Image: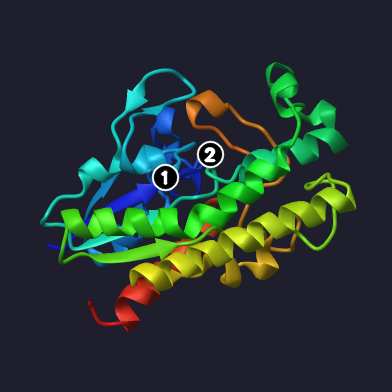
């Protein structure tokens, strides 16, 4: 049986999509890895975790919002792995945090009271730009470590679904300056992932491109809008993949694996 290890952040884990298997990691039993593995009959080890950065995947235990830690995700990759998928990098560049801070400025009442002070903190654009500049090399380093641990595995980078719509809506409260800023960060995250795949020789699934017409507030959105669930318990998080989005990414991954021979 094909051995599959799934690594990544919340866009891999699937907060708010029932059933939640590991609340502290917001890991769904119907995220794209779970869906693809089920369809293909693969033996899946899914260690994706909401809030994870590249360091949390590579080198350090991740501190969870609800308390406790989980080991570095790459420890789940062994020499017998046949497939490893990776969706990470957004937290390294504060993508979601920037989205949330910008929407919180437009609609502070929409933020749960305990989180208002945090989301009201300044946006550090210099730090965001600096992190984006080094992201391709960081992702390529991660691919290299996966290959060191699993020399025969297919390594597939799966980038982030498109979040930002062409204009603000009630589901996406934000002024135009901030909307353009967030759209730019999303595009640069997409470009960084593609650059890393080229640099490291990994395969690439472009969920971003496939979801251009499925951003927040579209007729058929693949991501959630400005809504907060129980974040500590794996509930719905704003601007994250919804069930339809995860099904779409699973379709893209299955297509990639089926249409292209193993390397």
Q: From the image, which quarter does the N terminus lie in?
A: bottom left
Residue plotted at (34% across, 83% down): 259
Please count the marks in the image: 2
Graded by Cα atoms within 10 Å as few (under 14), some (14 to 19) or many (20 or more), the crowding at tag 2 reads: many
Residue plotted at (84% across, 34% down): 105
State the image quarter where residue 67 is shown.
Answer: top left
Q: Is residue 12 left or right of residue 123?
A: left
What's the mark number on residue 16? Answer: 2
Asked if the residue under mark 1 is in contact with the one under mark 2, i.e. CB atoms within 8 Å, the reply is no
Question: Where in the figure is residue 195, as x and y percent of width and height?
Answer: 48, 69
Residue 67 seen: yes
What's the mark number on residue 156? Answer: none
Residue plotted at (55% across, 48% down): 90
2 or 1: mark nearer the eye? 1
* Residue under pointer 1: 54
Q: In the rendered view, would you say 261 is above or below 193?
A: below
């Amino acid at each position: 049986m094909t051995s599959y290890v799934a690594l990544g952040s919340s866009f891999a884990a699937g907060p708010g999509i029932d059933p939640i298997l590991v609340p502290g990691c917001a890991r769904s039993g119907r995220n794209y890895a779970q869906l693809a593995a089920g369809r293909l009959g693969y033996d899946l080890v899914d260690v994706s975790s909401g809030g994870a950065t590249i360091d949390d995947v590579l080198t350090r235990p991740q501190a969870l919002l609800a308390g406790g830690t989980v080991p570095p995700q790459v420890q789940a990759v062994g020499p017998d792995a046949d497939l490893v998928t990776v969706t990470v990098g957004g937290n390294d560049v504060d993508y979601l945090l920037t989205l949330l801070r910008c929407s919180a400025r437009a609609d502070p009442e929409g933020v749960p009271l305990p989180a208002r002070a945090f989301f009201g903190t300044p946006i550090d654009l210099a730090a965001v730009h600096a992190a984006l500049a080094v992201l391709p090399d960081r992702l390529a380093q991660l691919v290299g470590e996966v290959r060191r641990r699993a020399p025969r595995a297919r390594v597939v980078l799966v980038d982030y679904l498109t979040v930002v719509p062409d204009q603000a809506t009630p589901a996406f409260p934000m002024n135009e300056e901030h909307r353009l800023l967030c759209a730019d960060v999303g595009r640069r995250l997409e470009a960084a992932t593609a650059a890393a795949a080229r640099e490291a020789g990994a395969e690439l699934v472009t969920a971003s491109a496939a979801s251009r017409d499925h951003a927040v507030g579209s007729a058929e959105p693949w991501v959630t809008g400005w809504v907060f669930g129980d974040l500590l318990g794996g509930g719905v998080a704003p601007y994250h993949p919804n069930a339809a989005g995860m099904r779409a990414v699973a379709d893209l991954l299955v297509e990639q694996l089926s249409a292209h021979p193993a390397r």
